[in-house]
Image (cartoon, rainbow, N blue to C red):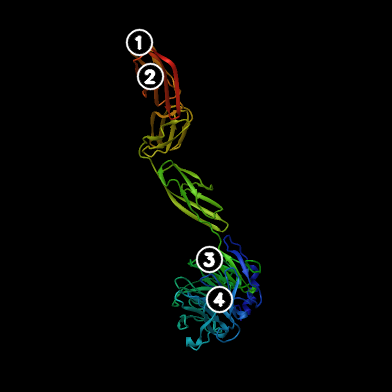
Amino acid sequence: MFRITSICLIILFLGLMSVSITHAATYTFVTKWGSSGSDNGQFSHPEGISVDSSGNIYVADPGNNRIQKFDSNGVYISQFGSYGSGDGQLNNPKDIAIDSSGNIYVADNNNHRIQKFDSNGKYITQWGSWVIGDGKDFKPDGIAVDSSNNVYVSDNGYQVNFRIVKFNSNGYCLAQWGSWGSNNGQFQNPDGVDVDSSDNVYVVDRDNHRIEKFDSDGNYLAQWGSRGSSNGQFWYPCDVAVDSSGNLYVADSGNNRIQKFDSNRNYLMQWGSYGSNNGQFSTPNGIVVDSSGYVYVADNGNNRIQKFAAPVLPVASFSSNVTKGYAPLSVQFKDLSKNAMSRKWNFGDGTDSTLQNPVHTYSKAGKYTVNLTAANVNGTDSKTAIITVQAATSKPVASFSASPTSGKMPLNVKFTDKSTGMPTKWIWTFGDGTTSTKQNPVHKYSKAGKYTVSLTVKNAKGSNTVTKPNCVTVVAKPVASFSASPTSGKAPLKVTFTDKSTGTPTKWKWTFGDGTTSIKQNPIHKYSTAGKYTISLTVKNAAGSNTKTISNYIIVK
């Protein structure tokens, strides 16, 4: 009744305990559902499994002669089918497939027919050997649907047919291919079938322990696999599934594992071993991958469905502050990798690092390929980039700007290198006893004064220095002070006033005591009338202002 014959079961049992291989990258168990029985959500040796566009899971439950529908987390939704040969009844349904409209096709094995249902499980039509027209019995096992809703069926036919039959969605026979044997395009018990995005057809050739690939017209393209338990070998495989990237998943039933291959049939990984714990299998028979990459397995002997998530692999990525420059070139690398537990940098000059964000200096001209390899327990990924280091052709010419160049203390000044000739080193002296080797430093002046700033730049060809006297002026609040000459005399009297304020004032305001004022620093004022005059000077700068007043300072007779 079931896919594995009694002889195969004996062979499988003898080899069960020898197949338990641990790999770094593996799929992770998510959930499971089902147990032995006939109630909702129970199974009697589930086989075929499929997924619709909404992510609902359909399971062929042959021992209970029904199809059960679940959501993606295994919550029971509905079922259809019962034992019998009438429309919509089933006898050992082996596999199911769903087309782009949500119609469901069932390989009704012991009724020798395909039945078509709508998305609610309502019977639409059926077809069998009578539409093929060659008089051979029809024993459908595996089933798949392509992008045009053509239906591909593996037909075992009581060990006679050994073929794939292609129908349109209404059951009209379009093509068939295959015969008994082990040559290219032949089969010994064709089983599970699936179709990729290019409508290539993959067939499980169970007793030849291989997968064969054909185009949609049945032309042989490739094969892989042989009998065994090593990576890429099979022991009575039962089903195959293709994901949206063209990766292939094989239910390797005799080895109680799932194997994954890329679209070029290169082995990638595997998971599973014999048992009933989470992630273990007892003859996994059906497999399907949903649009999110989750893998669902019909675990036949354990009467359950298991759901698995893809391994989280690292994605290597990085940036650098420069990609070219003159030797010696210092480069700051920044790791932007995702899902990485460790990393290794190769700088392309014979050196490497395991720091996350290293700084590396290239001392010689050349083009260097930098490689970052990111790793976690599931695998590795690499990213490369080119760093171009040039040799200097002439010595640099120093130049810079500063902003602001004046202000009250404390004063933060940003210095910007504007040198030409590709300097590789910078030495700043700020005039207050401090220095910097940054290209564009910010310096804080804490005391008032006028500061001379110089910049020396260097490269492999030489050095150059520029100096700017009194480049930065830092001011404190001024203190007003003054003198006058003469301070007494007969009218009219001319008096010269002299500013003696400290703290570098930038503005002056004099009041001469006779109702007149001046904003000159050192004014001359004429008094025309006899009297005693009080003089006041207010000085200002960016830091503040101050005033000094001398009463009866000027006496005019």
Q: Quarter of the image for the N terminus: give it.
A: bottom right
C-alpha distance separating marks 1 and 4: 131 Å
The amino acid pointed to by label 1 is Lys
Mark 2 Cα within 10 Å, few/some/many (few <14, many 20+)?
some
- Badge nearest the viewer, 3 or 4: 3
Q: In the rendered image, which residue does mark 4 sit on?
A: 206
Q: Nearer the viewer, mark 3 or mark 2?
A: 2
The residue singled out by tag 2 in the image is 514
In the rendered image, which quarter is residue 273 located in? Answer: bottom right
Say whether marks 3 and 1 touch (CB < 8 Å): no
* Cα–Cα span, label 3 and label 1: 107 Å
How far from the left and from the top, in percent, is residue 128? 51, 85
Q: Residues within 10 Å of mark 1 (few under 14, many from 20)?
A: some
478 and 138: which is toward the camera: 478
Q: CA distance from mark 3 to mark 2?
A: 95 Å
Closer to the chain start, of discs 3 and 4, is 4
Q: Which numbered disc covers residue 293?
A: 3
Q: Label 3's element?
A: loop
Where is residue 455 drawn, in percent x and y? 41, 32
Q: What's the amino acid at mark 4? A: Arg
- Amino acid identity at mark 3: Gly
Crowding around mark 4 (Cα neighbors within 10 Å: few <14, some 14 to 19, many 20+) is many
Reading the chain from its start, which is encountered first: label 3 or label 1? 3
Disc 2 residue type (three-letter)? Asp
Labels in figure, total: 4
Select label 3 or label 1 by which is in front.
1
User: Along the line of sight, which residue is nearer the eye, 304 or 282?
Assistant: 304
On the question of residue 365 being in view, the answer is no
Res. 380 visible in picture: yes
